[in-house]
Image: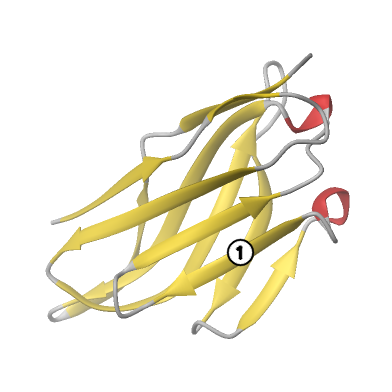
């Protein structure tokens, strides 16, 4: 069994910064992909950032140049550094890892979600 625990959300003013973290625990062999998604009220969940094999990154156009995903496979952890935050970044943010465990995988695992609110 694998669990993902997120932290770091909160209330921030426009132009401010936040850093989210997501840590996986359990019988993990390797984490192939680390993703951050977000879901705003009334909208579909969208992919914000992805890091593959700890090296290759992809970002949604709306966050390019402002958000940075960092993967630390040694600690089974991912970070999302969010700078120059805008009110439209307000959403619940979820981490999603594709994890291989002993004898199976990769399977999808999700964090519990953390609220990010950007408001003055």
For the point 36% across and 78% down, the residue is 73
**Residue 104 or residue 62, whichever sits in front:** 62
Q: Position of residue 66 (x, y in %)?
A: 80, 54
14 vs 94, left or right, is right
Q: Quadrant of residue 104?
A: bottom left
Q: Quadrant of the C terminus?
A: top right
Q: Is residue 59 above or below residue 53?
A: above
For the point 58% across and 72% down, the residue is 51
**SS assignment at label 1:** strand
Q: How is the image coloured?
A: secondary structure
Q: Quadrant of the N terminus?
A: bottom left
For the point 74% across and 48% down, the residue is 83
Q: Is residue 25 above or below residue 117?
A: below
Q: Quadrant of residue 88?
A: top right
For the point 68% across and 25% down, the residue is 40
**Residue 87 or residue 33, whichever sits in front:** 87
Q: Position of residue 100 (x, y in %)?
A: 27, 75
Q: Position of residue 50 (x, y in %)?
A: 61, 65
16 vs 91, left or right, is right
Residue of label 1: 69
**Residue 65 or residue 38, whichever sits in front:** 65
8 vs 73, left or right, is right
């Amino acid at each position: 069994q694998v669990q993902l625990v997120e932290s770091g959300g909160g209330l921030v003013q426009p132009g401010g910064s936040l850093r989210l973290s997501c840590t996986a625990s359990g019988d993990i062999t390797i984490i192939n992909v680390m993703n951050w998604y977000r879901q705003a009220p009334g909208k579909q969940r969208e992919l914000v950032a992805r890091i593959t094999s700890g090296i290759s990154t992809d970002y949604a156009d709306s966050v390019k140049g402002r958000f940075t995903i960092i993967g630390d496979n040694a600690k089974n952890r991912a970070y999302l550094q969010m700078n120059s935050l805008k009110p439209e970044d307000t959403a619940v943010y979820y981490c999603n890892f594709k994890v291989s465990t002993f004898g199976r995988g990769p399977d999808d695992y999700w964090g519990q979600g953390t609220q990010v609110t950007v408001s003055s």
